[in-house]
Each structure stands twice: as C-alpha cells, then as structure tokens.
Amino acid sequence: MASRTSTAMSFLTRTRGRNGPDWTDWLCYGYLLLGVFLMFGPVIWVTLSSFKSEAQLLEFPPTFLPYGQISVEVEGYDDALPLFEITAGEHAGKRLAQIRRIGIQAQMVDPADPGERIDIGINDRTPVREMTFAWSNYTDLFEKFSFMRYFWNSVFITAMATIIMLLFNSMAAFALSKYRFKGRMTVLVIIIATLMIPVTIVLVPAYLVVAKLGMLNSPWGVILPGAATPTGVFLLRQYMLTIPDELIDAARMDHASEWKIYWRIILPLSAPALAVLAIFAIMWRWNDFLWPLIVLSESEKFTLQLALNSFQGDLNTQWHNLLAMTVLTLLPITLVFAFLQRYITTGIANTGIK
Amino acid sequence: MGSGAMGSLLSGIFTPLFAAFMGLFERPMGWAQRRLGQSKIAWLFLAPNLIIFGLFTFLPIILNFYYATTGGVKILPEDRVYVGADNFKELLTCDDYLNPNSCNKDLFWKAVFNTGLFVTLQVGFMIFFSLITALVLNAEIRARGFFRSVFFYPVLLSPVVVALIWKWILQREGILNGWLTSLGLDPIIWLLSADWAFFWVIFVSIWAHMGFYTLILLAGLQAIPKDVYEAAEMDSASAWRTFHRITLPLLMPNMLVVLVLALIKGVQSFDEIFVLTGGGPGSATLLIVQYIYETGFSVQPQLFGIAAAASLMLAIVLLILTLAQLWLNRKSVDG
Amino acid sequence: MITLRATLLSSSVGLAALSVGAAEAQEIRFMCYGDGNECEVSQDILDRFEAENPDIKVILDKVPYQAILETLPVQLAAGEGPDLARVTDLGGLSEYYLDITPYVDAGYWEENFGETLNWYRKGADDAGIYGMMTQLTITGPYINKTLFDQAGVEPPADDADWDSWAAAAKQVAEATQTPFPMAMDRSGHRIAGPAISMGAKIFSDDGTPAIVDDGFSAMIEKFVGWNQDGTMAIDVWGGQGGASYQDAAQEFVNGQLVYYFSGSWQVGRFDEAIGDAFDWQVVGSPCGAGGCTGMPGGAGMVGFSQTEHPEAVAKVMDWFAREDNHAELIARTKNVPAHAGLAASGIDYPDVSEQAAAALGGWAQQVSKLSPVAFAYQGYPGNRAMFNATVNRVTQAIVGELSVEDALARISADVEEAVAEAAK
C-alpha cells in the first residue's frame, strides 16, 4: 500500500530515489515550503493576534508576536509605572519609569533612584516591551456568554445538515447516474442550472418561504434549505458514473433490492467522493453566516458564527474578542479535518486499486 | 498504529449503526419497488432532494421572477406594484455598451465586466496552481499528509476571517509594506489602486479556495494506475510526453469537475471580496453578486425589483454557460 | 424509529411546558447590538426591571449589527421579529413602531426627549411616541493636541472655516512628520455636517430631497481635492467601494493623524486605547455660510406594533426612560444624553479620565450648534439612501472613475430614483 505513492510524479521530477536528491527535488520542497509560508503564516498570525490586547491590535505597524509594555513597581508610587528606554539626550540608554506625561514632556523616574524626577521629551523614549498574552480575550468570552450553548448549536446544525445532505444527495445522485427514466435529463438540467445561483440573491424569497413554513428560529430552518445542494448531487453523480454498471447487474441477478444496491454497493464505493463532500458540507455549514443570521434571531438558538459576529457593531468592532472567538471557532473544524483527511486518503487508496 | 486502531474502533461503532439505519428503509422501499417497478423507483430516490430543492431553491427563484416585474421598496410580494419589463429596461439602457458610465445603471455594468474578468483570471490561475500543487504533492515527498493539510487549511477559514487577515497584511502600514521598505522600496497602498486591488482580490480568492481543488486533482492523480506509468517508462517516453499523453487525459474527468465547481464558485464570489475591498476602490472590484446583494438587500433603498431582474439575467447567462459545458463534457466523453 | 418517536415525544412535552410557562409570565424579546458595552449595561438595567416586574420576562438577544440593518426590516415586513430593538435607521422602520403614548406619561417623554421624538414619526402630522435615543451622537472633529504643541502651531479658533483647519493640520503634519493631516470616516452621514456648514440645504422648500446645491457641491469639490492632494488620508474613502463603512480611529490612536472628523461615540474607545500617549481634544465643527454644524444621529430603542404584549413593551421603554436608569445607561456607555433633564443637570461619568470627561463636555456643547437642516436630514425617513448615494459616488470621484460633476449628477439621479421607488 505504501509503495503506490511513489508513482505519478516521479516521471516529471526525474526522481528515482536511487541517486539522491537532484534539483527537481529541491524545486518541489522549495514550492512546498513557500506553500507552508503562504498558507499557514496568515493563520498563525491570526492565532497570535488573538492574544493581543485591544490597544495592541490597533498598533501600527503591527508586531508579529503579542507584546505588552513592562510596568515596574517603584517605591513611593501606588500603581506600577510603565517602563521606557531613553533614546536621546543626557539620559540616553537608561531605562526609566514614567510617572505622567504633560504635553510634550514626560516626567520620569529611575526605578533604582526613586527620589529624583527627570523630564524627558516624549520623542526621546520608546516603551520597553515583552511578550504578554492577553488571555482575558478568551476568558471574557466564557464569562460574557454561553459559549458551550453556541458551540452545541453549531455542532448540531453542522452534523445534522451534513448527514441529511450526504443521504439525500447520494440518493439523488444514484437515481441520476444509474437509472434511465423519463425526465432524467430535465431534472439534471434544472439541478445543474440552479447550481450556480448563490443563496445571497434569493435571500428574501427564501426567507418568506421559511417563515411561511414556521421554521424561523428553529435549527431546521437552517438545516433543511441547504440540504439539497446541487453541488453535492453533481459531485456525487460524476463520481458514481465511474462505478461500473456490471456490479449493479450482478447484484440484481442475486435479487438484491434497489435500496440494498444503493446502500450496500454504491455508497461504500462512493466513499472518497462522500468524504470530500462531507468536508465540504462541514466547513460550509460551520462557517455559514448570512442564512442563519436571517433565520435565527433568538440568541439562545445562535450558532458560533452568529455569536462571533455579535462583536461587530455599527461604529466599532471589538477585534480582540472577535479574534479570540475566531480561533475557538476554528479549532473544532481543524480537528475534524485532521481526523477526516486520513479517511480520505485511505478511501482514495482503496478505490485506487480497483 | 494508534490512529488506525482508533479508526477501526470508530468504524466498528459506525458500521452497524449505519447498517441498522439503512435497514429501516428496506421494507418500505421494497414495497415501493414491487408497486412501481425498477425504473420508476428512481423518482423515490430523487424525492427528498427534489422536495427540499423545490421548496427552498426553486420556489424562491420563481418568486424572484415575480419580484423582477415589480417595483417599489416594499418587501412582501402582495404589497408590490407591477411594472412589467421596466426593471429590465432600466438595467439594459446604455448609450454605449462598452462604457459602463454611459449606462443608466452604471454600476451594474461595471459589475458585469468586473465579474467576467475576475472569473476568467481567477479560475484559470487557480486550476493552474492547483494542478501544479497536486503534482508536487503526488511526487515522492516526505510528510505528504502535512503538506496536503497545509494547502487545504485556508479552505476551512470563514470568508470574513480570510478578508480580515489580508486586510491587515495589505494595509498601508501592514507587514507587506514593512518588507518593501526594509528592501529599500517605496511602500504601495495596495487597495487604493484599481489594478492592484483587482490583483489582490484574485490572489486572495485563489489562496482561500485552491486547497479544495488541489485535493480533488490529487485524488484523481492517485487513482491513475501505476502500470500505465511503468509502461511509459519502458518506452523511455520523456517526462513532458508522459504528462501530456497519460496524466492529463486520465485526469480529465477530475479537471472537468474542478472546472465546473471553480466556475460556479467564481461567479458566486462575494464574501471575502466584499469584506476586503467593499468593491472598491470606487467600483473597481465590484462583482455581480455584491451588486445584487447591495441593491436588493443591504443598502437603502432596497430595490428588490432591480436586484431580482439582475439576478435573473445572471441566471440566464449561467444557464447558457452550464449547458455549453454539459455539451462539451458529453462530447469529450463520447469522442 | 423508536428513538425518533421518543425525541418527538419529548420535544412536544417540552413545547407544552413552554406554553404553560408563557401563560404565567409575559415574555418579550429585545434585539440589541453593541459598539461596546451597550447591551451589557442594558442587561443590568433589565435585571432590575425584572426584579420589580416579576410577571414580565425580557430576553436580550445580542446580535451582529448586520442583523439590525439588514434582516430586521425583512423580519418585520413578514410580521416576525422581536418586540423591542435597538435600531439606527430610525425613520426607515417607522411603519412598524408601536405607539406607547397610551401606556406612558406622555408629558414626561415630550419634555425630555422632545426634539428626538420626531425622528421616529411617520410624518409631520404624526404625534405618537415611538422610541427613545439611547445613544445620541454628534459628528465633529478631534485633534491630536500634542502634535499641535510639538509643531508649535496654535489650533484655529472656534469660528475657523475648513480652509484654515486644513492649512493648520497640514502645517502640523509637515512639522511633526505625521503621515496624515486629516481624515474623515467613510460615511455619507459624516460628510453631511460639513456640507450643511458650507450652506447645503439638502431639501427643497416643499420638503422633498434636493441634495445637490451650491453648498453641497462646494464641500464635495473641496473634499475630493483634499483626498487627491494628500490633505485627507485617501485610503479611508478611496480604499473601499459601495456603501461600506470605514473609520480612521486606528490612525488617530497611533498618533498618525492630526485632525480626525468623526463623532462623539469615539470618546470611550479613545480613552481606553490612547490612554496617556498624547493629548486629544474635541474641537467644534468648522464654520461656513451655513453655520458650524455637525450631524446628530445615533441609536434608539423602539417597540414594534406586532408585539403581543404592548403594555409590557411600553413598560420596559418607560423604565429605560426613567431619569436614574437613563443616567446609568448614558454614563456607563460614555454617551451624550438626549434626555433634556439629564443634559441640564449634567452627567457624572464614572471611570473616565479627565481628558475623556472634557471631551464628553465638549460634545454636549456642540448640540446647541446643530443646524435645523441637520435635524431635518437626520429625521428624514429616506436619508439612508441619500447617505449611501453620497458615499458611493464621491468615492468614485476620489479614485478618478467619475469627475466631480458626474458624481454630483449621479448622486441626484440615485436619490431621485430612491424617492420615486419609495413612492410606488
């Protein structure tokens, strides 16, 4: 099983695995490393930024790591004082604590010699900083609202929607790929034609339909409308076309029912396509925002994405909480993906043998 | 291996559950099969999908037809005023069809032109890079699983997050300009120039979506039987020739799936771009879905009639495209 | 199948339990969005309300602002939606509001919210009480005083016009090597105040919109010119499209901006983010032929007529209007009071620096300078369409897609179309 991986590209890269790495290998790895940098870098940056305090997030130019200014306790002062490094003038190079700033002068004090006050121009000092993680961005979330409830709502909607979608779409794809019946072409054309209509542009009529059906503020109002995705039907049908009809004929000889043929033969053989669609469905539902926003208006029914966006106001957005929430929203889907992607590979490998 | 054990444990639970669930439908479906016969039962398989599809996709589209022939700013269909083809006329009135500024609805035409250019470039480059990446990932490399996940990872991000990340990178004093200055170059205000903004909009949407297409192409590559290549190697065919004669033709079904899906996604592009540029600078990156969304829904006054008319025209164009594609697809399969 | 039936059964039992509960207490829902702590403070005030009114249960749903702006109108049109909400399109939703006059002391409301009650009404002959400003905002400029000090430039006097402010800001920016002399939020509401100051009348004599006139054109021309010559930070308007909102608070907080035309809502955020880094001040709007006005605006609390419990809704609103509760709301959210009694007695803001307290005082003084045109514009139900047309087209002029003349013509055409469609 493991050896099959060494095939397709070897001819292009001239790697034979015998003469050690040659330039095409370096090219490959160079490309991959660039990929890691481009694809992963921004995500890591978001994660690091989620540990920045509100003021740090506004900082120009942004730092990569979360930094905070160091404060020191100075004798004779009740509160800790922010520490600065002096960059010019007679005290250049010293580290002084700032008592207060008046206009363009700062009153500072040497922590080692708290008795004496020193006046410094505000352009002659820079803050001394160290890495600090603003955990409060995260702890706030759990205090401010019921994270677990939103999490559960999201999981329920995502899981149900994915299962229903896989079931219904695969049934439809089976019918469209393995039967010849009157009206097949019509159905196919309608499905494929609407494949391209984004929900965004039928938002209002779709809302009116859901409202008439009494599904507002119910998870089903979010789950059902997206369950019959043309994309899924199309993807699965294309895959099922490659499954040889002889298998079905043989099963019919053995008096298997059509339903059995569907779930015993077709479904397992479509596993790779189903896995791809599952990943598609999961991330699609998990990140869905516009449709849940219009269907759900009671906060106890909210999904994570809706709760996440409640940090967006009219005139101001609370980025520090929004980012922390983003990372938390990202975590579960990352885990699901890390788990499922192994299944895809094995699924692909299994069907690859044929 | 640990994960293998976990996998078999999970499938040990999953398989009987799945079988029990599917078994529930055995009797009713068997009964239906006896009543309907073998070919009509296809409709039963289609039914759940068609019902949902009809209610939540088809019916709204029909309602959209009605909206397209009405005017005013009222939301409920019964409150609206019939205006006939006025909305279409309004959208289609231009002095010079190649110059959006001369049109009644200048922004609609800007959006049409922008979308055409965007989809062409975005889909073209995305398929190109997905193919390269899939080929590299299919080569004899270490840590393939890791690299594959890396390329796929951005697909998991929500559009808002994607836009946000790149907004930070591209802002006047963002990281990218920081690098430019440290190299002694002048910083560029990326999203202020129409050309750069268009470039970045394409770049970011490729960045966010190519992982998915790479995965599909990679699956296709791995499904190509090994012996085909062994035969080619024996004939000492050149690398390019092997790629051109064996890999590409065998990959064609996957390429078609990728092309169709990428085109659909491309035409529907909206969220990331909307948050990243808002369609700006000016209207340089305004795409058709954003135009429809803003005209009919998010921006006052809500002109549902105009938006519905625009979406119908979009749908007709897409229908033609899709049918052309189906036809090509069939031709390539038959021939 | 058994499990399925069990779930159905248990959920219907759950439903029954719910409806029994509903008969005992009136449940109303308040849809709230927040720029900061507005919803949290409202929740505290509601907790006390529920303690005093055990028969009414108020559930606060904190939603994204987008829900208020985009989905609430659709929900209301379909007869759905919450009982109460915090909204910003005050006039646009007026057909759905609940008149609370029968349930409250109308005299108290008229006396204290007199001027702003009009913003919620359907027209001139409507005398109902529909809503209360929970966040009154005024647009106007902030300056980075420290940069002025460093440059040795004296800020222009109260009656200075736009040109002298632009010249001063440029001088300061050059002397201190600050990248941006001026910036203005990307919003048609923000640029309306300056335009009115320049003499724009916005409406014709019969009250219909006639947005483009000499005063308006003069301001737009100046503004576009300043964006193109670097006086204004061009990314704020030019870097966006459509009607999307963009502020320049980040630049101001980082000391990279000398003069920032925004509004009173920034005080809390500036106080937090700037801290002791530099001195900032509220200065009055620049003057012109039409006065020295900003725009009033903000968010208000309204009830909807489709509610099943109108009396409870009115009770909640009245609770928020009560002087002590209203004072708490305004003080803790760091806003300017719209309540006349509180405005007269002054608000005691807890946990703010002297600087922020001075700024809030500065904003309160600006209220008297607001032009009647500005009030009329803010109170016009179709004003959103006018703001959006302005922002969209002026941006196109800034980035060079349209000439200023064409942009102004497009603004007129867009507004005319909006008025015509609204009349259908």
Image (tube, grey):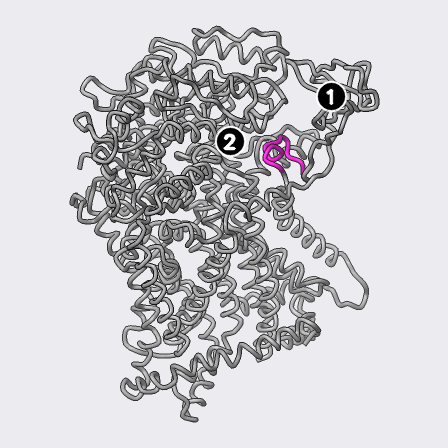
The residue identified by callout 1 is: A125
Q: Main secondary structure of the magenta part?
A: loop
The chain letter under disc 1 is A
SS class, disc 2: helix
Nearer to the camera, B65 or C247: C247
Q: Is residue C211 above or below residue A341?
A: above
Q: Residue at x 74, y 64 (%)?
A: A15
Residue lying farthest to the bottom in this orientation? A254
Residue B70, given in percent of the width and then of the height, sits at 20, 45
Image position of A65 (left or right of B25): right
The residue identified by callout 2 is: B192
**Amino acid at circle 2:** Leu
Give the spatial CA distance, label 2 vs label 1: 34 Å
Q: Residues within 10 Å of mark 2 (few under 14, many from 20)?
A: many
Q: Is residue C351 above or below residue B107?
A: above
Nearer to the camera, C249 or C322: C322
Residue B54, given in percent of the width and then of the height, sits at 29, 64
Image position of B91 (left or right of B164): left
Residue C73, given in percent of the width and then of the height, sits at 30, 42
Image position of A219 (left or right of B73): right
Q: Give, as a single range, the part of the protein colored magenta.
A: A53-65
Quick check: is B295 in the magenta stretch? Answer: no
